[in-house]
Image: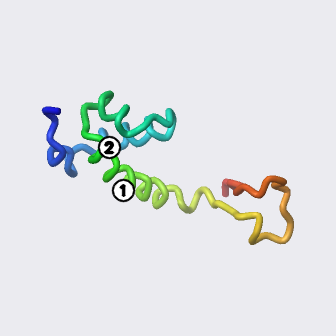
Amino acid sequence: MVFLSWYIGESQPTLKLAVTLRYLASGNSYRSLAYSFTVPHNTISLFTVDVFEAIIAQYDEEVVCVSPAHTQESSDPDGTFTILAR
């Protein structure tokens, strides 16, 4: 690929967010996203973690994840996590 991984750096937050949101929405592999956005797959694997952490930090106070194992009553029969909006 002609696109250099160092070029993505801090100057491309919009591209990082777009790739990460496409990954979450579509479930495509990093290699598939690499062809769609002309970004190397190994670079995508590095910055998606940072974008996930930024999203969690931004919305941490608005959404809380509760495990049924830590609550007195569980209305979730399959034992998955329940997302509650504040």
Residue at the image position 31 percent from the left and 40 percent from the top: 14
Q: How is the image coloured?
A: rainbow
Measure the C-alpha gap from mark 1 to mark 2. Answer: 9 Å
Question: SS at mark 1?
Answer: helix
Which quadrant, please, contains the C terminus?
bottom right
- The kind of residue tagged 1 is Asp
Residue 18, above or below 61: above
Residue 28 pos. (x, y %): 45, 34
Q: Report whether 60 appears left or right of 71.
A: left
* Label of residue 16 in the image: 2
- Pointer 1 with pointer 2, Cβ within 8 A: yes
Q: Report whether 34 appears left or right of 83.
A: left
- The kind of residue tagged 2 is Lys
| Residue nearer the viewer, 34 or 22 | 34
Residue at the image position 63 percent from the left and 60 percent from the top: 64
Question: SS at mark 2?
Answer: helix
Residue 3, above or below 11: above
